[in-house]
């Protein structure tokens, strides 16, 4: 009997898993279907570059035809729901796709934590359209501002996405000599919460050198059309407000009969969910790793994608599943044209910046593009990374 294997999502986990599954199922009696709302894979951890320069889009958007083989059926559609009883995926337009084995790799959406006015008034950075809209609003605000009355751009959340977005806006400001004041707001005591203090301090220094004002230890309690309000401090007016403060699962998993937390499917370290025919990976999943789940990062998704593809093939063949352990190979982030690297695997210096960190940041993105597409595509993208 031909087994129907369906993959949902074209992020790091989805794209990587499709290639893994193609290799694992090459000689099996199986049909592979890939479903995504977009007909491309976005190198999401470089999407902040589009805020400064929209043309970067061409280098970080990889068509699905460069990733999947012709034998894989691709369906461009939005996933509306998953019915584990009938083993179907409901799509927009009332279409449905049947599966024998399903891989949920839908990624995440922005979490607003119930903060009044946040969802209605904040921009987010979860895709290309978001990055273009931030660029448009920053450009428009700057055009109406003056040196005596600069535009105020506020970034809420000082994790990787918030820091890198602030860095790109600072570079835009400097390149265009635009009158812009930039604020990075974090509810907790320090930027990059939970990270090593050496990394936090180095990143803070680079942000301050880029004239980004950092506000910490005071959570946002409300956002309206003109200002954000804090638990203790005075309101902060803004012209552009970007929220990067957290993630939650996709609405398509709301009501799905799989064990989950806030629509992120819980699964074992072999990626199997509460339904033995459904696997989950990437930001869609909370993957058991003992004391703490795997982090919702591109690095973790890359590592997991290869193993989950093999495990689905093993499940089809009634073989024992492999367990996966996330390996933290370090943190590398950009702040405009500069970069910081910390605890990078096989490099003796714990925290470094300048050209070596910038080169490493480029190399990581280029390697992923080469793996998922081709070396020429990666070389073409090099200057944009």
Image (cartoon, rainbow, N blue to C red):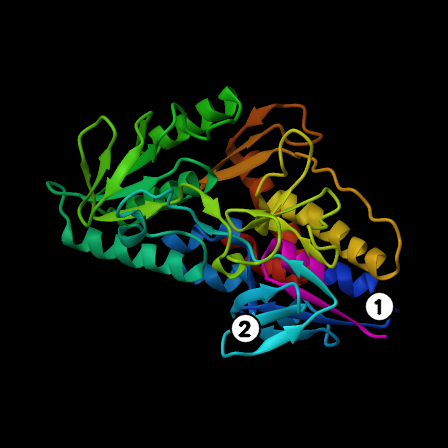
| 220, above or below 171, in the image | above
Does residue 163 appear anywhere in the picture?
yes
| 193, above or below 54, in the image | above
Crowding near the residue tagged with mark 1, few <14, some 14–19, many ≥20 C-alpha atoms within 10 Å: few
Q: Residue at x 21, y 27 (%)?
A: 233
Q: What residue is disc 1 on? A: 26
Q: State the image coordinates of residue 385 (x, y, percent, origin top left).
A: 52, 50
Considering depth in this image, is 91 or 146 the residue closer to the camera? 91
Q: Secondary structure at mark 1?
A: loop
Q: Is residue 81 magenta?
A: no
Q: What numbered label is drawn on residue 166?
A: none
Of mark 2 and mark 1, the one earlier in the sequence is 1
> Which is in the foreground here, disc 2 or disc 1?
2
Considering depth in this image, is 92 or 53 the residue closer to the camera? 92
Magenta highlight range: 1-18
Q: What residue is disc 2 on? A: 91
Q: Residue at x 46, y 28 (%)?
A: 193
Q: Residue at x 67, y 24 (%)?
A: 348
Q: Is residue 368 left or right of residue 242?
A: right
């Amino acid at each position: 009997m031909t087994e129907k294997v369906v993959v949902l999502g074209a992020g790091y986990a989805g794209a990587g898993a499709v290639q893994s599954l193609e290799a694992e199922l090459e000689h099996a009696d199986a049909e592979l279907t890939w479903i995504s709302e977009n007909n491309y894979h976005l190198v999401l951890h470089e999407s902040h570059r589009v805020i400064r320069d929209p043309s970067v889009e061409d280098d970080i958007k990889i068509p699905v035809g460069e990733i999947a083989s012709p034998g894989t059926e691709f369906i461009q559609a939005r996933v509306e729901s998953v019915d584990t009883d009938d083993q179907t995926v409901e799509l927009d337009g009332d279409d449905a796709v049947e599966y024998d084995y399903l891989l949920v790799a839908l990624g995440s959406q922005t979490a607003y934590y119930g903060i009044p006015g946040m969802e209605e008034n904040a921009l987010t950075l979860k895709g290309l359209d978001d990055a273009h809209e931030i660029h448009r609003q920053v450009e428009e605000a700057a055009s109406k501002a003056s040196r005596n009355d600069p535009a105020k751009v506020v970034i809420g959340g000082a994790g990787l996405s918030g820091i890198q977005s602030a860095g790109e806006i600072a570079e835009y400001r400097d390149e265009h000599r635009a009158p812009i004041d930039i604020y990075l707001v974090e509810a907790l005591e320090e930027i990059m919460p939970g990270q090593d203090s050496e990394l936090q301090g180095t990143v803070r220094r680079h942000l301050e050198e880029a004239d980004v004002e950092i506000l910490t230890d005071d959570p946002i309690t409300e956002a309206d059309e003109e200002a954000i309000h804090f638990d203790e401090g005075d309101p902060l007016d803004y012209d552009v407000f970007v929220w990067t403060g957290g993630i939650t699962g996709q609405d398509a998993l709301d009501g799905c009969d799989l064990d989950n937390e806030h629509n992120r499917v819980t699964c074992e370290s072999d990626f199997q969910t509460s339904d033995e025919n459904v696997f989950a990976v990437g930001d869609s999943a909370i993957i058991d790793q003992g004391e703490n789940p795997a982090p919702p990062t591109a690095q973790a998704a890359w590592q997991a994608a290869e193993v989950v593809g093999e495990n689905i093939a093993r499940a089809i063949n009634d073989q024992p599943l492999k367990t996966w352990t996330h390996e933290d190979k370090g943190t590398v982030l950009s702040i405009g044209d500069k970069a910081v690297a910390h605890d990078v695997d096989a490099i003796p210096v714990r925290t470094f910046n300048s050209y070596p960190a910038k080169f490493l940041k480029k190399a990581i993105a280029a390697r992923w593009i080469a793996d998922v597409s081709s070396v020429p595509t990666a070389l073409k993208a090099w200057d944009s990374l």
